Image (cartoon, grey):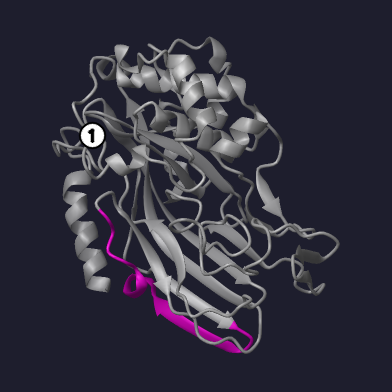
Amino acid sequence: MTITLAIVLAALSQVSGPGADGPAKTGVPLIAPEGPLQRTDMVQHRFKLTFTVNYAPIPATKENWTLPLIANGPWSTLSPENFTIVLSAGRDRRTINGADDFTKPNALGEGALQVSLPEVGSWPLRIEVQANVSSWSSRLDNAAAMQIGWPERWPAEVSPLLKPSLLIESSSEIITKTVEALTQGQVRSVPPIQAAKLIVQDACTKFKVGETRMSFGQQGQLRGIAVVGAEAAAKAGSGSPADLVCICVAMLRAAGLPARPVIGIGSGTLGRGDEFSIWAEVYLPQCGWTPFDPDRLRQQSIRTMDATQSWEYFGVMPQLQRRIPLAWSFAPGDGNSAFDSWAVWGWTRFLKDAEFPITITGGAIETPSGAFTLIPQRPVPSSVRLERQ
């Protein structure tokens, strides 16, 4: 599939790259920003993701190992060149051309690695993914965006992002009632950008963000993202930065604005292990996918900010090019293939009858059929290491 990926990315770049006279005009900005929303500075990155699977799943599976990846997004483009996967277990090692196992990107620019894993004779299994990606920062002309009204209908490709999805329970009663109370059923009485800001402002003001951002093992291994989802977090009134993103996205969808989470690598130090970074995008008519960072916004006294004015970290994200967007979901599909934690990739559940995400207590995992004891050398079911090079 190397040729397919290269051709698709080349074709998409014809409509997604900014030209000398500003952003390309596509008519309907499914991928590329346009009009008031523009790409600015660009940085080229090489990233390495190392997924360590310490145990065979119970029961065994022949399903493909899957990693959703943004091939061509509004703020990043994945290169098909030097895209490699290395599988290693014990003395066995296999290198794969990542483009060969990458699915054709959908209309919004997301594809997935789907890798058939060999039989493992000696655990752990390590799956190392390396690729090059270009990332852009964003600029938004707020005054121009404020002149744009609501569309008669959203593009068909965008409309699914008005519906509930994994950890984004936008039809949940607590979400819909919150939106109704905020908008009084008059969400379209203001421009879409203003409505989006008012919704994000309400979520960031009311939701309490705790210190826990990621899920770690006792020895510091990064297991995944600490997230319970929009509905559970809204009921609790507190949670992680990822939960705040889920609530914002769910409320925007409930109000009739397409939105999605973004899971990526933050602007960390070169060569060092990093954490996942989570932010969001809302689809604004005649602009496209507008990035915003709820966690940064809440740190800026968002309660008093004027929704008719320009906001840094809402459309205006001058350091966005330092981030590497990876995916628009916390796991593939409906999430049932996530292994033991929310870490973007999927294969199968580690223990089918264990509560998910898996909790480890005293070196063991409790299940209805009994405890599964982890050995000291492999104290977590899986872990991930994120690196920029």
Which region shows up in magenta?
A: 89-106
Query: 161 above or below 45?
Result: above
Residue 267 seen in this snapshot: no
Front residue (pair 335, 13): 335
Give the residue number, with chain letter if any, for mark 1: 154
Q: How many marks?
A: 1
Rendered location of residue 388, percent (x, y): 52, 56
User: Residue 105 in magenta?
Assistant: yes
Q: Quadrant of the N terminus?
A: bottom left
Q: Which residue is drawn at 20% across and 58% down?
A: 10
Residue 297 seen in this snapshot: yes
Query: 35 above or below 365?
Result: above
Rendered location of residue 77, percent (x, y): 33, 52
Q: Residue at x 57, y 88 (%)?
A: 92
Front residue (pair 147, 34): 147
Rendered location of residue 286, percent (x, y): 21, 29
* Residue neighbourhood size for the residue with mark 1, other residues' Cα within 10 Å, grouped as few (<14), some (14–19), many (≥20): some
Rendered location of residue 194, percent (x, y): 36, 17
Displayed quadrant of residue 220:
bottom right
Residue lying furthest right = 362
Q: Which amino acid does label 1 sit on?
A: Trp
Q: In the drawing, does residue 330 fall left or right of residue 72?
A: right
Front residue (pair 106, 25): 106
Q: In the drawing, does residue 166 fall left or right of residue 101?
A: right
Find numbered disc 1 in the image and state the secondary structure of the residue it sits on.
loop
